[in-house]
Image (tube, rainbow, N blue to C red):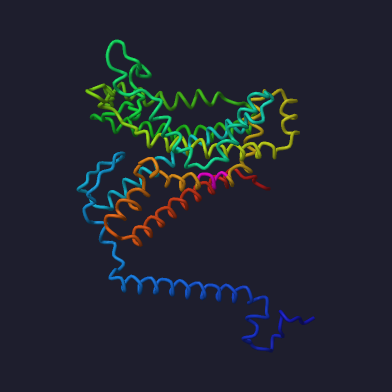
Amino acid sequence: MTTMTDPPNDQGFRLSQLIYDTRYRSATIQVIALIAFMVIAAFLVRNTITNLSALGKDIDFGFLFSRAAYDINQKLIPYSSNDPHWRAALVGLLNTLLVAILGCILATVIGVVAGVLRLSNNWLTARIMTVYVESFRNIPVLLWILAFMAVLSESLPSPRAFRGEEAEASMWLWNTIAVTNRGTYIPAPVWGPGSAIVVVIFLLSLLAIWAFGKWSQRRFEATGHLLPNFWIKLAILVGPTLLVYLLLGRPVAFSLPELAGFNFSGGIHLRNSMLALWLALSFYTGAFIAEIVRSGILAISKGQTEAAYALGLRPSRTMNLVILPQALRVIIPPLISQYLNLTKNSSLALAVGYMDLRSTLGGTTLNTTGRELESMLLMMLIYLVVSLVISSGMNFYNKTVRLKER
């Protein structure tokens, strides 16, 4: 039987088939949409160039190689005001990535713990977690950033409180960490000869931990015997590195913070602006992750828990081995969005004076060079690339934990 979508073989191709034939209609619509998008984009670009030319401006990225002439208080790589703007932007990008990575880690820990505790049978524990989740979710993150900054600046002791025999404050962890209202000072590594070998051994230990985890999982699935993974992984992480460190004569030393004058010197200075931003973003995002974890756990049938209890598994084992592995398939997709939101929310760092990408390239560089369009385009492109990298990495991990069908 002949239909409109299957014309006779003796008839040639007709232009009307591009619209009325379902074999070609979808491709025709996509081509039309692509052409329309390109026309609109070309119009906007041409209009922008024309207006900039009328104002005596042209699109030029040469400003990136001119002297920045401003300082950055928190930096991971060497930088001075004599460096070009592209290096200032790189310092800001590294600061953004630092807060994003640390924030995602801490937010995940807080979210998993809070999400599990919200389902606790202990009424007080569950209610406290509920108050935490509802408080942080319903107050803008900018207010939390300012609140954490105020707490760190006003409630912590000043460096002078550490002075004298009758000091009002003391350092933490055997006098190695100083927490003050000017920031937190932690030991800084001093790399000596042979330190590169120690770092390589440490990285190889991390690789060995990953390989052991894969082998242990396969062994558990085949035999049902569970090894003390935590202690074995801890031994793999600490043992080889510590042994090489001692054999090479301790090539890595540490510079401890010391009170000198009116402030601490030595060590690494973590400014309150960075800590306030990190803690605020972590607790704020952790509240959303807690709800994701809670919903993921509730999505698992109660029969799974009852079956695990019937086999003699303790509640902690049941959660780690039965519930959470299945809940990950529900948790990870919305978790990706929270990681992306945390990374993009780090652009609020300007409110507390933390020099991130928004404050350097999209702030001081933009204002001093007058290159608004170029700075914004570069900043948007960088945020886009960072977001796509995070999304791609998490999507790859999501494929590894999804249910594998036969």
In front here: 308 or 339? 339
Q: Position of residue 53 (x, y in %)?
A: 31, 73
Q: Dominant secondary structure of the magenta stretch?
A: helix
Q: Which residues are magenta?
A: 335-339
Looking at the rendered structure, the number of numbered marks drawn on it comes to 0
Residue 80 horizontal side relative to residue 116, left or right: left
- Compared to 45, does 327 lie above or below? above
Measured from the top left, where is residue 347 in percent x and y?
A: 42, 47
Residue visible at 38% across and 18% down in the picture: 173
The outermost residue toward the top is 165
Residue reaching furthest left? Answer: 82
Is 302 on the left or on the right of 336, as rendered?
A: right
Residue 157 rendering spot, x and y as whole percentages: 36, 23
Most foreground residue, 164 or 193: 164
Q: Which quarter of the picture shows residue 225?
A: top right
Q: Position of residue 95 (x, y in %)?
A: 36, 42
Q: Is residue 337 magenta?
A: yes
Q: Is residue 121 left or right of residue 149?
A: right
Instruction: Specify whether residue 3 is painted magenta.
Output: no
Q: Is residue 377 above or below residue 21?
A: above
Front-most of 262 and 249?
A: 262
Residue 219 location, quadrant: top right
Residue in the picture at 33% in, 27% down: 185
The residue shown at (29%, 53%) is 365
- Tell me what residue is drawn at x 30 percent, y 40 percent: 75
The quarter of the image holding the N terminus is bottom right
Question: In terms of depth relative to the viewer, which is nearer, 47 or 210?
Answer: 47
